[in-house]
Image (cartoon, rainbow, N blue to C red):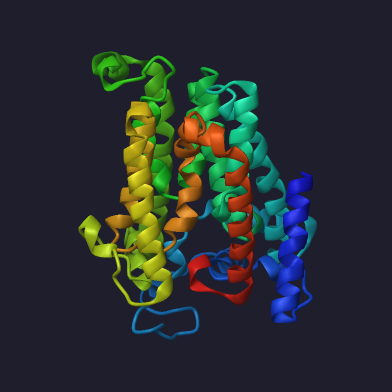
Amino acid sequence: MLWFICIKFLVYLMNTLVTGDPGWASAFHRFDSYWYARIAEFGYPGAEGLSHTPSGEVVAGRVQSAWAFFPAYPVCTAWISSFLTVDVPWSMELLSWITGPSVALLYLWWSSFHLAAGLARRSTWIYLSFPFTIFLFFHYSDGLYIAAFLGAMIAADKGQRWLSGLILAFAVLIRPNALFLVPAMALYSPWIERWTDVQWKDVLNDRGVWRMCLPPIVSFGLFSFYQWRTTGDPMAFATAQKGWDRTLSYPWQGFFRSGDPATQLESVYTLMLIAICALLWRRLTPAFRIMLIVGILAPLVSGSVDSMTRFSMAFLPLFLVASKTPFFERYYQWLIIGFAILQFGCIYLWCTGDLLMA
């Protein structure tokens, strides 16, 4: 918790120095935060929301819509705002004080199922010092999503697959990527270590697997029905992605797509992630492989590598497996120092409004 408080105050002080704005909540409120706040306050628009922005304008020749964002995070912030009678940005800030420390505790708990106690603690510190986990402190849905993802895996580790399924159903309403994790969760079992261990007939005949996999599918279906009733388009969220230049594409088309520095850096970063996954491939279980493939491929097939830095926060198996390597054990302290310096740089970029932190 002390770690969380220190970073919060560091972001606030940096933002005050850079922008001159002494507001606390505004230091953590940027970019997509405004979309989530708008949904929390006013809900989703009707069909017109897919063709006109809330102000009736078209942004850079394209329409950006609230439908691009899933409902669980803004609904949670709206509940907090209503219950405590505070403004939505402050309810988002209060929620971050719950989800941020929760992710730290849940990661430690989850990693303890797979690592020795001392190594689990060190793996947790590596994850928390990772430069882009800084988004845990901001008014974004990432903290809630990763907490739910960790909760689902912990429930599965403890054999509570029905609970894992219910948590996954909630995670789907935070971010649609959770739906693509369903096949991975079906294989997420301690006795499946290699593809040769997978007995597909046993997996498909296991009622526990279906109890875990059906709730997120039903959850996604219900939200699709809501989209259809409201806009006439059951995949309104996918249609709205066009406002951010995301359309179905070949995976390689998103790399170096535009000339701005943020996209170039995101492209290089994505290639680095792919290289690291390749190096650790043999150490990954089937479930972990699917999780990482989905995590990388989902943005790529949308034709954009934008926000891959932020999305990589959810590549939890990568941090877990990397923690077992000799490189990690040898350079643990240096990794912490290097990550901490980069995290400080990310805080500065956030405060200056750099698109790399969007």
Q: Is residue 17 above or below residue 121?
A: below
Q: Position of residue 167 (x, y in %)?
A: 53, 35
Instruction: Left or right? Give the position of 197 relative to 75.
Output: left
Q: Is residue 87 visible?
A: no
- Picture quarter containing residue 154? top right
Instruction: Left or right? Give the position of 205 relative to 139.
Output: left
Q: Position of residue 194 (x, y in %)?
A: 31, 20
Q: How many marks?
A: 0
Please tell me which residue is depicted at 73% across the width and 50% down the height of the picture: 4
Q: Position of residue 293 (x, y in %)?
A: 32, 42
Please tell me which residue is depicted at 79% across the width and 56% down the height of the picture: 84
Q: Is residue 199 above or below residue 139?
A: above
Nearer the observer, 144 or 205:
144
Nearer the observer, 100 or 14:
14
**Quadrant of the snapshot with the N terminus:** top right
Instruction: Left or right? Give the position of 275 relative to 27.
Output: left
Q: Is residue 71 visible?
A: yes
Nearer the observer, 105 or 244:
105
Instruction: Left or right? Give the position of 168 relative to 92.
Output: left
Q: Position of residue 201 (x, y in %)?
A: 24, 15
Q: Is residue 184 above or below residue 356?
A: above
Please tell me which residue is depicted at 72% across the width and 56% down the height of the picture: 7
Nearer the observer, 114 or 59:
114
Q: Is residue 316 above or below residue 192?
A: below
